[in-house]
């Protein structure tokens, strides 16, 4: 117990809680804005419209890995700010080149690109290259802000993204746009996020512009070659396992199944983004120094325990209640999305705890092992969805949820072992967390019974 208290005392510093609190607060406001308007959007747009948005977002997630070459992950690592800014420049150059090439391909072969995405061609295709550039640029700016611990700026940017996106989608839907309004509004939200962080990054670049050029960029590429060589393949395997199934489900033309999955993911991503994403960014900002000082195990244990105790319970509670209220909250066409939320509870819970500490693989130089893990996991997840589609397409979402839960559970074990955590430490976390999670389960069942009675 004394050893654990010593570990937690290093973790629970005022600086840590201030950083996490800033990010959590900003993300909370962003999520509240998005979720508050979501019932309005679901009444403006059909599940089929959300299917197209899901395909676009999956495509951007996959493409962003290629545009940045995963070099944004290296931005917090160098000791000198000039070297980190050279990495920012590398990401921006790579993003610009790939986005322009994608723009040319979309203009030249619109039918082929749309067919590859399982959709019909249309003006929405222009959002693909624009979205790739915005996602890549935002990633570079955000990791620079993370390095400089500009968490207040990141929080404000997330609010701007959320407000700009949902407001644009609502305005376009009100004027009569259908699926194009959803994807265009999403792109506008991305642009709103790039603007503020981009300006602040450019101001930081001004004093060092004479020391940041092509030479320093080439030097940083030689130093951090493992990121484009191994991390890009690892990330592609990871996003392929999580995003390609969405495209496959949409292409299977199962009504609005991909739309239901997209709505369920968007609702369940709220606690993950609120807590897991914020903690993950602060973890990344502190983990390199903790590793050098031999305290990475204590930092990782504190993060795992905090997420297990604070985040898993609300996810379980939301999953239990969702099937009873989704049709009423989002409209009668969306009842199926509530059932999907319940199916996704184990996957989201393991993802919540595992993803924030996944950077331990990069920080410790385990890119090869991370690549193997994600390739196996991606193949397993995509293979399960394809197998379900071949046997009975109605079970594709179930296959996606179960395979995802298995993958994130295995990943959690690998990440904690890499951080030198012992099995007994993880067992102690489970023992201390089960009562809190059980209380949330009880709240969920009580809330579901109340909802059924109230709506009867």
Image (cartoon, helix red, strand yellow):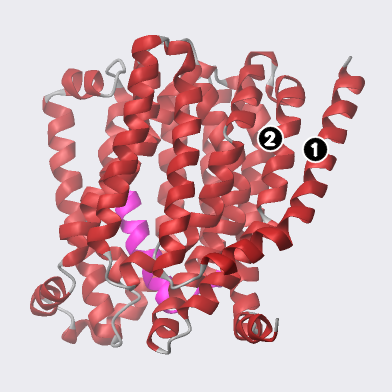
Q: Residue 362's x, y, as percent? A: 31, 67
Q: Residue furthest front?
A: 424
Q: Residue 308 occupies which quadrant of the picture?
A: bottom right
Vertical position of residue 448 compared to residue 222: above or below: above
Q: State the CA–CA distance, disc 2 to disc 1.
A: 8 Å
Is residue 233 shown left or right of residue 340?
left
Is residue 87 shown left or right of residue 9?
left
Q: Residue 421's x, y, as percent? A: 49, 71
Q: Residue 101's x, y, as percent? A: 13, 42
According to the picture, the residue beneath numbered tag 1 turns out to be 444
Is residue 349 shown left or right of residue 195?
right
Q: Residue 52's x, y, as percent? A: 41, 24
Q: Which numbered disc, 2 or 1, marks the residue that appears first in the sequence?
A: 2
Give the residue at x 20% y 45%: 99
Give the residue at x 28% y 32%: 126
Q: In this rendering, does residue 50 appear at all?
A: no
According to the picture, the residue beneath numbered tag 2 turns out to be 319
Q: Is residue 147 magenta?
A: yes
Query: What is the span of residues highlighted in magenta in the rendered image?
Result: 134-152
């Amino acid at each position: 117990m004394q050893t654990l208290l010593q570990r937690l005392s290093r973790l629970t510093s005022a600086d840590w809680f201030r950083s996490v609190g800033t990010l959590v607060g900003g993300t909370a406001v962003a999520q509240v804005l998005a979720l508050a308007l979501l019932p309005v959007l679901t009444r403006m747009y059909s599940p089929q419209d959300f299917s197209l948005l899901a395909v676009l977002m999956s495509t951007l997630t996959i493409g962003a890995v290629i545009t940045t070459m995963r070099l944004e992950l290296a931005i917090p690592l160098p000791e000198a700010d000039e070297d980190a800014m050279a990495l920012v420049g590398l990401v921006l150059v790579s993003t610009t080149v790939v986005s322009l090439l994608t723009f040319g391909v979309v203009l030249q072969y619109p039918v082929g690109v749309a067919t590859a995405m399982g959709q019909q061609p249309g003006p929405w295709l222009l959002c693909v290259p624009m979205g790739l550039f915005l996602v890549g640029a935002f990633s570079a700016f955000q990791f620079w802000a993370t390095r400089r611990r500009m968490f207040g700026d990141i929080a404000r940017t997330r609010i701007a993204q959320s407000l700009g996106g949902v407001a644009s989608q609502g305005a376009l839907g009100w004027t009569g746009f259908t699926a194009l309004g959803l994807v265009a509004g999403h792109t506008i939200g991305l642009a709103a996020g790039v603007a503020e962080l981009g300006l602040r990054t450019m101001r930081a670049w001004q004093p060092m512009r004479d020391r940041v050029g092509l030479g320093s960029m080439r030097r940083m590429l030689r130093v951090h070659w493992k990121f484009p060589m191994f991390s890009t393949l690892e990330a592609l395997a990871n996003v392929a396992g999580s995003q390609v199934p969405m495209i496959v489900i949409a292409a299977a033309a199962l009504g609005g199944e991909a739309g239901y999955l997209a709505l369920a993911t968007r609702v369940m991503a709220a606690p993950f983004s609120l807590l897991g994403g914020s903690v993950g960014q602060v973890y990344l900002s502190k983990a390199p120094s903790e590793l050098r000082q031999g305290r990475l195990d204590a930092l990782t244990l504190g993060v795992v325990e905090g997420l297990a105790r604070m985040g898993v319970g609300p996810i379980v509670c939301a999953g239990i209640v969702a099937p009873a209220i989704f049709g009423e909250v989002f409209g009668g066409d969306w009842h199926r999305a509530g059932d999907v939320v319940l199916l996704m509870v184990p996957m989201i819970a393991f993802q919540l705890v595992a993803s924030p500490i996944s950077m331990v693989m990069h920080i410790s130089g385990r890119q090869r092992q991370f690549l193997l893990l994600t390739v196996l996991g991606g193949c397993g997840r995509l293979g399960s969805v394809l197998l379900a589609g071949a046997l009975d397409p109605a079970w594709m979402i179930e296959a996606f949820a179960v395979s995802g839960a298995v993958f994130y559970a295995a990943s959690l074990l690998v990440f904690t072992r890499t951080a030198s955590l012992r099995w007994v430490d993880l067992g102690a976390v489970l023992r201390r967390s089960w009562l809190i999670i059980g209380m949330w389960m009880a709240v969920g069942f009580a809330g579901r019974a109340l909802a059924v009675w109230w709506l009867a």
